[in-house]
Image (spheres, rainbow, N blue to C red):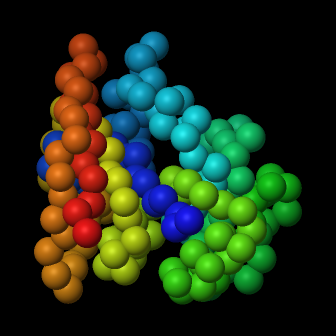
Amino acid sequence: MPLKASVFIATSLDGFIAREDGGLDWLMGATESADDHGYAGFMAGVDTLVMGRGTFDKVMTFGQWPYPDTRVVVVSNSLQQLPASAPEHVELHPGPIPELLEHLQATGAKSLYLDGGKLIQGFLREGRVNELTITRIPVLLGQGIPLFGELAKDVLLQHMKTTSYESGFVQSTYRVVR
């Protein structure tokens, strides 16, 4: 059975996932809501979180590790080993994506949560994303790290649903059309 790879991510209204320096202050202030905007339900459906090096470095600054019960694989071709402060269940893989997917499938993964701009862009270029859930936060940053990058060809999407929250967040889910 092929792996399912899903994206669940927030962007500014103008499409950025972080400031140019990786800052998430705009997002942290906006998410002070009792509503998790579907995150817990999404996480219940994945068994492995695959994140890029930049995302891992950012998450390590949070203090408390936010994924205590989830297998996490950090993809980096420059990091030789994880820092000693990394949780025990975090793994490192050098990529590339086809070899990573082969490893994940061989080690029991079935449903992936992809996190990190470059990683998501790479999976899209490889045609390996099945579903995208994008939550648009009502703020314009003007510049930053974009969610999407260059693609060799169009990626056709089928709209599945859109939910509007009292917080002003608008969340849309798309299936990638093969």
- Determine the residue positioned at 38% across, 26% down: 37
Which of these two is toward me, 24 or 87? 87
Q: Quadrant of residue 74?
A: bottom right
Q: Is residue 73 above or below residue 113?
A: below
Residue 64: percent from the left, percent from the top? Answer: 71, 38
**Residue 39: horizontal and vertical position, in percent?**
47, 32
Relative side of 26 to 94, left or right = left
Q: Quadrant of the N terminus?
A: bottom right
Relative to residue 14, is residue 118 depicted above or below?
below
Examine the rendered structure and indicate whether residue 78 appears above or below residue 1: below
The number of numbered badges drawn on the structure is 0
Q: Residue at 37% of width from left, 37% of height from top? A: 27
Q: Image point 38% across, 47% down: which residue? A: 9
Query: Is residue 85 or residue 135 the one in the foreground?
Result: 135
Residue 88's image quarter? bottom right
Q: Position of residue 177 (x, y in %)?
A: 23, 63
Quadrant showing the C terminus: bottom left
Residue 47 percent coordinates (x, y): 64, 49
Could you tell me which residue is drawn at 74 percent across and 40 percent down? Answer: 69
Q: Relative to residue 98, is residue 133 drawn left or right?
A: left
Q: Nearer the viewer, residue 161 or 75?
A: 161
In the image: residue 53, left or right of residue 104: left
Does residue 63 show up? no
Tell me if I can see residue 153 in this picture: yes
